[in-house]
Image: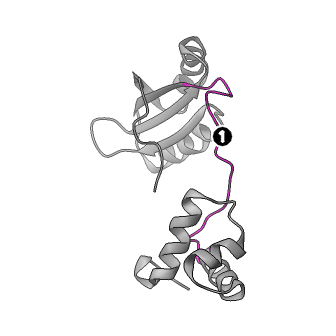
Amino acid sequence: MAENSRDLDPIDLSILKILSTDGRITVTELAKTVGLSKTPCQVRLKRLIEDDFIQGFKAKLNPAKMRLEHVTFVEVKLSNTSEGALLAFNSAVADIAEIEQCHMIAGAFDYLIKVRTSDIQSYRKVLAESISGLPHVSSTSTHVSMESVVDEIT
């Protein structure tokens, strides 16, 4: 089983790069693009999935069409950072649908959360009713995104 990117050859890297931009490409087209026949390409693809280089396939949704264009980043400080407190926070934060990302941070605060809602009023409701009530939250600080400049891993 592959452990890191050093175990990937140039064809594997090409497959990953292509799939990161077009997850719906057919195996036949993928094989043609990377210079393999279909069966060896399928074998490599299966190995990349089994070795967890590919963690899944999903649709890229259009936030504007879904009326979810309002993005905020929330700095969260906890009152307690024991392992139990962190686990309680981590478990509870995963249940808030509007939270798109949550990262534990080393620095002046404990977590950075990306929240996506339809507007500032919706965000205020999520902050007041959900985020502020998460286990061990002592304070929050909100930063409103004006524009997304880079939003993909490529």
Specify how the rendered protein is coloured: one colour
Relative placement, left or right, of 104 versus 20 is: left
Q: Nearer the viewer, residue 2 or 103?
A: 2
Q: Quadrant of the N terminus?
A: bottom right
How busy is the neighbourhood of tag 1: few (under 14 within 10 Å), some, or many (20 plus)?
Answer: few
Identify the image quadrant of residue 49. bottom right
Residue, x 56% and y 57% (percent of image)? 21
Could you say which is closer to the camera, residue 61 or residue 77?
Answer: 61
Query: Where 129 falls versus 148 (above or below)?
Result: above
The magenta stretch spans residue 53: yes
Drawn side of residue 57 relative to residue 139, left or right: right
Magenta residue span: 49-69
Q: Is residue 56 left or right of residue 135?
A: right
Please provide percent x and percent y for residue 10: 45, 81
Query: What is the residue that sits farthest to the top in this orientation?
Result: 121
Q: Which residue is mark 1?
A: 61
Question: Could you tell me which residue is drawn at 61 percent across and 85 percent down?
Answer: 36
Q: Between 43 and 88, which is closer to the camera in this rendering?
A: 43
Which secondary structure lies at badge 1?
loop
**Left or right, residue 84 beside residue 32:** left
> Is most of the magenta stretch helix, strand or loop?
loop
Residue 120 in picture, x, y percent from top left? 53, 14
